[in-house]
Image (cartoon, helix red, strand yellow):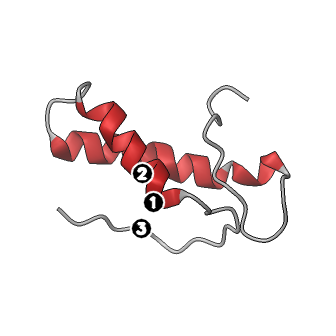
Amino acid sequence: MMLSCGAHCHTATHGTGCTLSAALTALRSQCADWPETVAKAKSWLLLAIAEAERLEVGHGIGPVHHFHQWW
């Protein structure tokens, strides 16, 4: 399975690898198969990256917004 992603210009991408791994682990038992699991994890992570600028923490490459769905 290949994950593709369009170009992005976000500066808050710190922790994306660990976050994707955790999302895959958490979602696997809720999904029918790996393609569905990966699609849901990727969708959630892309939103976490897009919403990360709202956190306004640190300097430079900031963290993704893990709780973007709630605040």
On the image, the x and y values in percent for residue 3 come to 30, 64
Q: Amino acid at mark 1?
A: Gly
- Residue occupying image coordinates x 33% and y 43%: 24
Quarter location, residue 40: top left
On the image, the x and y values in percent for residue 42 come to 40, 50
Marks 3 and 2, the one that precedes in the sequence: 3
- Circle 3 sits on which residue? 5
Find numbered disc 3 in the image and state the secondary structure of the residue it sits on: loop
Q: Which mark is residue 17?
A: 1
**10 Å neighbourhood of mark 3: few (<14), some, or many (≥20)?**
few
Q: Which mark is residue 20?
A: 2
- Residue occupying image coordinates x 72% and y 68%: 61
Q: CA distance from mark 1 to mark 3?
A: 14 Å
Quarter location, residue 62: bottom right
Q: Is residue 7 above or below residue 51?
A: below
Give the quarter of the figure containing the C terminus.
top right
Q: Which mark is residue 48?
A: none
Find numbered disc 1 in the image and state the secondary structure of the residue it sits on: helix
Q: Is residue 41 left or right of residue 30?
A: right
In this view, the residue in front, 13 or 51, is 13
On the image, the x and y values in percent for residue 6 come to 46, 70
Q: Amino acid at mark 2?
A: Leu
**10 Å neighbourhood of mark 2: few (<14), some, or many (≥20)?**
some
Task: Tell me whether the residue at label 2 lies in contact with that at label 1, contact meaning CB atoms closer than 8 angstroms.
Answer: yes
- Residue occupying image coordinates x 26% and y 24%: 30
Task: Tell me whether the residue at label 3 lies in contact with that at label 2, contact meaning CB atoms closer than 8 angstroms.
Answer: no
Find numbered disc 2 in the image and state the secondary structure of the residue it sits on: helix
Q: Is residue 64 above or below residue 40?
A: below
Q: CA distance from mark 2 to mark 1?
A: 5 Å
**10 Å neighbourhood of mark 1: few (<14), some, or many (≥20)?**
few
In this view, the residue in front, 71 or 6, is 71
